[in-house]
Amino acid sequence: GTTQTNQGVLTSKDAFEESFVRHVETTLARNMYNCDNLAAYQATSNTIRDALLIDWANTQQKQTIQDGKRVYYLSLEFLMGRAMDNALINLNSRDNTKSSLTELGFNLEDVLEQEPDAALGNGGLGRLAACFVDSLSSKNYSGWGYGLNYQYGIFKQKIVDGYQIETPDYWLKYSNPWEIMRNEIQIPVDFYGYVYEDHDPNTGKAKKIWAGGERVLAVAADFPIPGFNTDNTNNLRLWNAKPTNEFDFTKFNAGDYQQSVAAQQRAESITSVLYPNDNFESGKELRLKQQYFWVSASLHDIVRRFKKNHKNNWNKFADQIAIQLNDTHPTLAIVELQRIFVDLEGLEWDKAWEIVTKVFAYTNHTVMSEALEKWPVDLLGRLLPRHLEIIYDINFNFLSDVEKKFPGDRDLLGRVSVIEENHPKSVRMASLAIVGSHKVNGVAELHSELIKTTIFKDFVKVFGKDKFTNVTNGITPRRWLRQANPKLAALIAEKLNDPNYEYLTNLGSLKKLEQFVNDDEFLKRWDSIKFDNKVKLANLIKETTNIEVDPTVLFDVQVKRIHEYKRQQLNIFAVIYRYLRIKELLSQGVSVEEIKLKHYISKASIFGGKAAPGYYMAKTIIHLINKVGDVVNNDPEIGNLLKVVFVPDYNVSKAEIITPGSDLSNHISTAGTEASGTSNMKFALNGGLIIGTVDGANVEITREIGEENIFLFGNLAESVEELRHKHIFEGVHISETLAKVFSAIESGIFGNPDEYRALIDGIRYHGDYYLVSDDFDLFLQAHTKLEKVFGHHGGDANDTDHLHKWVKKSVLSVANMGFFSSDRCIDEYAEDIWNIEPLSQ
Ligand code: 26W
């Protein structure tokens, strides 16, 4: 039947080629004589998509028939990256596709390069959501993602004269073969208007009606999410905002046809652009509109699906449905479900609220106050008048309970209240999320402990500690090992005697690699794979910056969003110090060879990451990195002793090259500020070592891989408060080393020093909030230590010293990284929070 024919394209060359040609000729309306790589990409992806749709339809049917509990993951960001290679791997069709394409005259790698990244996210939180949907499918759960189908993803970053320039990412320039437009799934979403009271004609009871206002349609676009080594294929549903064809007749009759149409057109702006802030809340009305649009459409979709099987049997709702809130961005979902139950379905308030709180759970991703969402009551009440009333009612009930439990504690009431009585008076979304959820989790052990003792302390008092839990983040080994690092993945499969790569869904089996750690031949193969990956990274650097880096030197990488708390400034200051010292030694007549032997090994410092467009300090850091690079890389005395690179437009597909190509990566946030970090896991899984602070998941990585295999440094989270206090009352102590760096910057060797004023003054005069001064010398010491371990040769197979010290640590790290699979993470959510089990296959 159809199934066979379609699935055949995955394993048979003839079937693949036939489908490919058919798509070129029909879908693309071209012919094989003018089929370029882009057309080949489109024909290939359409071919794979056809096969994927079969699994997808079967899975949906199976899930409906089994009628078990489903989880819905609500995330404003899904940072998926490219889909094709991932689909080929998960469908086990990579070899067939590669050889079929070769016969047709194409090279798979070149074809894969044609796909634009689906860059619908900022950083960690968005990529986590992407890893989670992969794990939900791969571990046979019934779990959907819900998000927005932005027409513009995160901006593209260009570097011009060392400055970041943002340009739009119009990623849907060509049609997107991975999306299935569901034009028949249209959900109206209302804004503004007013609320009035009416009486139910049957019961005579008072009832709230929300009326008037502006109406927008949510139209579904579906993205099939294939699992690895399973047919289970879940759905990621992203909404598009579209105008309705219900005209505003008052305007129409007033002869305002043009304006009426233009107003409708503006509906689409709701899903036009992803907000490019990371860990910073800006409070824009359009952002709140996005949130409600998405949440409302998703909930009505979920309720509709429930009703198809269970009618109005609301008692079953919480047994059938779990909804996970990815940060506070979807918190209005709690209010919307309560509204659906009470206003639209006629449930009693308490009954409805009981169901609501059973359904929702909330994940917190940050303790930083500037990232906590607060919406002014005025704004929220204008946009969503009925929701504001419901929020007040939720808060009233909640505060009454608190008052009963802690009579007379007015301060406590003020601190936990969902409403902040301040200027402007606002709604605290985290408080609302906690009150409306049955579980709240942090994303790494340290972070989950910190939220209980800091930002959510009072809620622990009110609800008890069992409401708060930890689920340490994870990453999908399909994309971040098998796809990004095929050679290492193959060596591991060979050593584990696992030709079908089953270890990729059972990552604990990496442990077996430990038995080869004294096998020199194995270490050499391991090291030469790392070298090949470094050559690939060197090529990327050459293509994107025109800088040549020598792949035998230590590749020291820091790629992530640029943020003061992540401390790229600490890193670049240390690079400047190194440069100054090298220059000093050279001026004293010390030869380059001697410097390499006695002082500094050769290395390339590689940076990448975007700054939020309005974040001045982050942009200053980018500028400094680039200017330091200009000076160092063009200094004829330096040669390959030191290179400084800023890779522009860091994104998922670049991460797939950068991650496997690093020897060392930096995870050096001020202790207590990075909730988890997930790139630390990616680097370690690819055999890179970590230099890091005792922060986020670094703590658990250390526990798993052993403290001898990671380079930790810096002040601990428990000291941060005291140090900040000291800075303010006793002043900031600038060590001799850091002072040298500051005076070099101030001398103007990296361009006009005024441009870096805020960066230096922030440390020297404004309290050094991120503790750069406290950790600087400790950072330098950690480098001295690790360079001794690395030795002088990366990639030199005969350097047994490097092999027995560095490469051995690399193997031991990978062997013990199994815990950080997002599969483990999803299992923990399923068991402790969602109460769902995998589908029987
Ligand atoms: C409202 C503005 C805003 C935008 C984005 C606030 C907060 C965010 C995200 C929560 C920022 C983010 O991506 N956080 C990261 O989440 C990762 C996944 O849990 C963690 O690994 C990172 O440590 C955390 O910074």
Image (spheres, grey):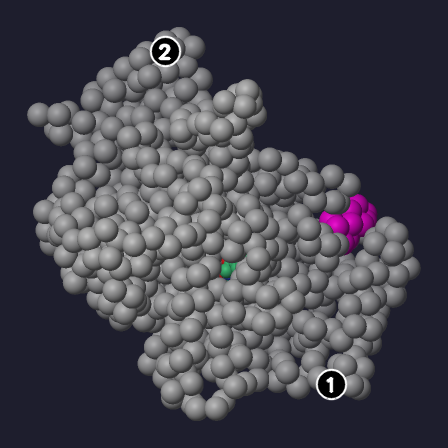
Q: Which residue corresponds to mark 2?
A: 29
Q: Which residues are magenta?
A: 621-636
Which residue: 27% across, 69% down?
350
Which residue appears at 43% of the width and 38% of the height? 215
Using residue 23 as the reference point, say whether residue 711 is left or right of it: right
Among the 4 quarters of the image, the one containing residue 103: top left
Q: Is residue 683 visible?
A: no
The residue nearer to you, when weighing 715 against 217, is: 217
SS class, disc 2 = loop
The kind of residue on which mark 1 rests is Lys
Characterize the local packing of mark 1: few (<14), some (14-19) or many (20 or more) Cα atoms within 10 angstroms.
Answer: some
Reading the image, the residue beneath label 1 is 726
Compute the Cα span from label 1 to label 2.
70 Å
**Amino acid under label 2?**
Ala
Asked whether 7 falls inside the magenta stretch, the response is no
Measured along the vertical axis of the image, is residue 512 above or below residue 321? below
Name the spot of residue 643 as percent of width and height, x first. Answer: 70, 51
The residue at the point 88 percent across, 61 percent down is 746
**Horizontal relation, residue 747 to residue 642: left or right:** right
Dot 1 or dot 2, earlier in sequence: 2
Task: From the top left corner, tell me how far across and down residue 371 is, in percent.
Answer: 57, 63
